[in-house]
Amino acid sequence: TAAPQAPGPDPAPEGKSAKRRPRMLLDTACKVWFGTWVLVLVLNVRALLGLIHSLPFLSKRQAEDWSHVVCGYMFRLSIGVCPWIRIKWEPIHNNNSNTKKGLSGERLSQVLDKDTTQKPVLMLMNHCSFIDSLIASAVLAQAGRGQFRFLMTESLFHIPVWGTMCRYLGHFPVFAFANKAGTIADPLGTTEGKHEDFRVDKEKMQRVGREIDAFVQSGGGLLIYPEGTISRQVRKGLRVTELLPFRYGGFAIGIRNKMRAVALVAQGCERVWPWKAGIGGLPGTIHLVAKPIPECLEAPSHVEASQRAKTSMEDEAVALFAEYSTDETGPYDPFIKAFHALAGILLFAIWAAMLLPLLCAGTCGLLVTCAAHLLVLLLLLLLFVLIARGQNEQPSSSSSS
């Protein structure tokens, strides 16, 4: 059956711009709030990761694992303090009956724990927004999987602060010629049948490949975005119903190291952080499906493995779109969850006020500021627990038929 057509952006109704203005102001407020929290947490996480890596009793591998847990929970906090953003785990779509059955809304940790083969995991995630990395880090940390590493384009390692965090986390770079030479055939994804040229520097990737093999053989897991870039449909302002052709490199690693494949399919990330938006944080629901694909890495070649994975993940993306295509704006729920936002505002004000002793009291002020930072960090973590238990991650109420 043909995939349902994704609707384009709705044009603004004539004469209704005044009615849209309050919504635009509220969207701006949501983005400022989310962006402020991301900035504050990223700067503090950068400092914490540096502290973790300086501990003499931790090996490099242990420091990276601890860093993943800290980073993941902080990213989850940046989403948790935005009550208008929800994360819902959805059940797996069943192709035979066109209904959702099986692992009904199970979270990633439950899906991973079901497997008894003890094989290292190759996690596959579709790429539809800049918030994908935050979501992936958060769900892996909450699943207790700090031993995961990401394959990321090498250019991200040159971004100030963010690149340093990537090195502290032990992520592996992908040296693509397109990132440096600009050899991108279709940068906006507007031409059918074309997508970015992601040829890699084979000499450098051989060295990275040896490091990846050693990491996986020691029990580590990998997360890759097999599309290699953000979906073409998202760049056109559409919802995700078709994935780009998958790159083969990650599947070659999986077959070579006898890994097992698990898909993490997302729908709705592009609403929370739209393409070309400087910062995200818009109201919306992010629907996630965790789906084992045992047949993927049993394929005789990495080419066929990528095709099997693409078919399976695309089925989930289409099913999510068909069920939630009318979910245009997502929930605000500002009144039900107002106390979460108010608590966040109060804690953020205390956090900002703690910087004053640092400016006027020398060494004593530094000690007081550090102690106060730790206290507020504990309060923030407590707030996160309350939010997580009270809202965002309840399984979907969709029932199997």
Image (cartoon, grey):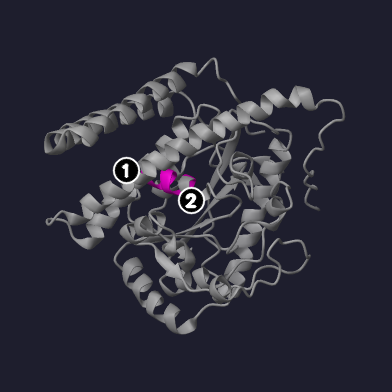
Q: Is residue 40 above or below residue 147?
A: above
- Which of discs 1 and 2 lies nearer the camera? The answer is 1
Which secondary structure dominates the residues rendered in magenta? helix
Residue 158: x %, y % from top left: 43, 64
Label 2 element class: helix
List the residue tagged with mark 1.
44
Residue 55: x %, y % from top left: 15, 53
List the residue tagged with mark 2.
133
Residue 194 occupies which quadrant of the picture? bottom right
Q: Is residue 352 above or below residue 246?
A: above
Residue 119: x %, y % from top left: 38, 61
Q: Residue at x 70, y 43 (%)?
A: 321
Membership of 259 in magenta stretch: no
Q: Amino acid at mark 2?
A: Ser
With 388 as the anchor, is 322 left or right in this view?
right
Q: Which residues are magenta?
A: 135-142
Instruction: For residue 357, say whether it is visible.
Output: yes
Residue 198 occupies which quadrant of the picture? bottom right
List the single residue furthest toward the right.
14
